Image: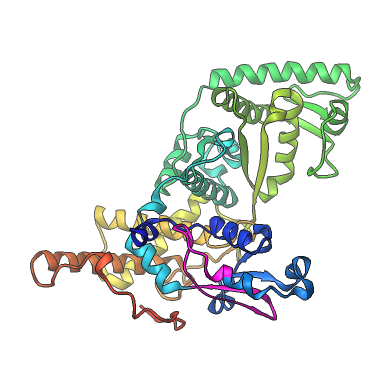
């Protein structure tokens, strides 16, 4: 029974780091999960030698602690192959064939949401900041699309981690909603605009009173914008400015800014009763400074919002190579779709036509766009080459390459299943009956499919 229990328990990096830290009698933060392709050939986890020196004389780990690490055995821990000290520090390498066997035999636990230990922090309001200004499809820039894709991905990840996720804002444009849906982005498309407008009106009255009381009336106030001294007001209300940009001061607040804050405030009021929540802002880098202003403005206008944890996740820029006028998100998608169609015609000939092929090309394009915008770490710049000859089914860095080969593999599996159902091939045995003993070495060669 122990083997069965071990085989069905999910393995999570956070739990592995916690167990390794406990066994080493050190905090989990001293361990690093290796990510370098070169280093992964010899190790999966590392404690740098500098960190070892803080806990052990001369940075040497006692032999009995290394034996303790090697003997770790729990349902949610992966089997270890070796643990040793080297010039880099203390390294741990997993028994990967055994781990692969566990995961492949039963991957159902990985599809279940994680139970949350702290129910007071279960609510996450996911604010995709660029969507507040996406009033038309032409206004949706490439950096905005990248942020929307990341926000949609985070919603899935946070949900699987046991969080209750509420996306904000409702998409303000029908054409933007349809475009995002085409890319598989699930985002709300309706909201109570009357309540938001009521909140905007009360915010306006509050800010005008603040400006009048602060004696800032000498400055001409536009009917559409209100000039607010953020830093002075924050100091007056004893708000800490730690973490904010040092030059955060005057803010010309527009109606759209107030509408942005009002949507957040309505979400908090609707969702939070006695439990605190976290607001996670997904922002394109060019709007980072502006979002800090909105963050502080919200705290100034609504004292109760100071109990809300706000976090900012910044997306790097999207640069189109060899282009003086970057396309909108819609133009980028249509260009990639036309290139995907052309590549398909070159590969499959004149049979590429009709509704079924259009559905396939659209699906492949959506997946390729996601691949291009999300394959780069979120803080780094994405470089897009939109020239006609750039999209190809060859070369492993191309989104089209990945999607075509996924489609080819799916076709191969379908062909096998059809042949097996006709008795041409024997039935594939259950994954638990397969022997993985021959998987002894990592594949380091790159093969062309």
Please state the horizontal and vertical placement of residue 237, each as a whole percent of the image: 84, 26
Query: Would residue 302 be visible to someone looking at this image?
Result: no
Give the total number of marks visible in the rendering: 0
- Give the camera-side residue of 345 and 142: 142
| Quarter of image, res 16 | bottom right
Image quarter in which the N terminus is found: bottom left
- Is residue 364 positioned above or below 346 on the image? above
Return the x and y of residue 353 as percentages of the image width and height. 26, 59
* Looking at the image, residue 212 lies above or below residue 6: above
Q: Residue at x 56, y 56 (%)?
A: 14
Q: Residue at x 67, y 17 (%)?
A: 201
**Residue 360 point in image, percent of width and height:** 31, 57
Furthest residue toward front: 64
Q: Is residue 40 left or right of residue 88?
A: left
Q: Which residues are magenta?
A: 68-94
Q: Residue at x 8, y 66 (%)?
A: 422
Q: Position of residue 437 (x, y in %)?
A: 34, 78
């Amino acid at each position: 029974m122990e083997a069965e229990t071990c085989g069905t328990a999910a393995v999570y990096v956070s739990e592995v780091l916690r167990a390794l830290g406990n066994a080493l009698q050190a905090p989990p933060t001293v361990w690093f999960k290796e990510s370098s392709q070169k280093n992964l050939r010899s190790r999966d986890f590392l404690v740098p030698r500098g960190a070892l020196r803080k806990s052990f004389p001369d940075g040497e780990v006692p032999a009995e602690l290394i034996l303790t690490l090697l003997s770790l055995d729990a349902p949610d821990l992966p089997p270890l192959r070796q643990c040793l000290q080297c010039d880099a520090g203390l390294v741990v390498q997993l028994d990967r064939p055994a781990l692969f066997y566990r995961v492949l035999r039963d991957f159902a636990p990985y599809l279940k949401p994680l139970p949350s230990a702290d129910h007071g922090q279960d609510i996450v309001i996911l604010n995709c900041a660029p969507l507040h200004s996406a009033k038309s499809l032409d206004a949706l820039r490439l950096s905005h699309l990248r942020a929307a894709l990341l926000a949609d991905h985070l919603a899935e990840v946070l949900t699987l981690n046991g969080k209750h996720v509420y996306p904000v804002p409702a998409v303000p444009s029908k054409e933007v909603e349809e475009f995002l849906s085409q890319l598989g982005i699930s985002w709300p498309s309706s909201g109570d605009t009357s309540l938001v407008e009521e909140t905007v009106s009360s915010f306006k009255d509050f800010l005008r009173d603040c400006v009048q009381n602060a004696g800032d009336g000498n400055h001409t106030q536009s009917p559409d914008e209100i000039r607010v001294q953020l830093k002075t007001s924050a100091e007056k209300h004893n708000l800490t400015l730690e973490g904010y940009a040092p030059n955060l001061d005057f803010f010309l607040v527009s109606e759209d800014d107030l509408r942005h804050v009002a949507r957040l405030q309505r979400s908090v009021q609707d969702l939070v009763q006695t439990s605190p929540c976290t607001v996670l802002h997904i922002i394109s880098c060019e709007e980072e400074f502006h979002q800090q202003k909105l963050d502080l403005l919200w705290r100034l206008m609504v004292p109760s919002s100071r109990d809300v944890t706000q976090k900012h996740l910044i997306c790097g820029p999207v640069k189109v190579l060899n282009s003086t006028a970057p396309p909108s998100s819609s133009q980028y998608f249509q260009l990639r779709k036309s290139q995907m169609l052309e590549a398909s015609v070159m590969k499959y000939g004149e049979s590429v036509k009709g509704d079924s092929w259009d559905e396939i090309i659209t699906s492949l394009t959506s997946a390729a766009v996601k691949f291009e915008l999300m394959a780069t770490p979120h803080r780094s710049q994405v470089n897009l080459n939109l020239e006609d000859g750039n999209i190809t089914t060859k070369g492993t860095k191309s989104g089209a390459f990945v999607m075509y080969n996924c489609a080819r593999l799916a076709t191969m599996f379908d062909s096998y299943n059809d042949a097996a159902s006709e008795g041409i091939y024997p039935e594939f045995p259950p994954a638990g009956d397969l022997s993985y003993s021959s998987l002894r070495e990592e594949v380091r060669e790159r093969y062309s499919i």
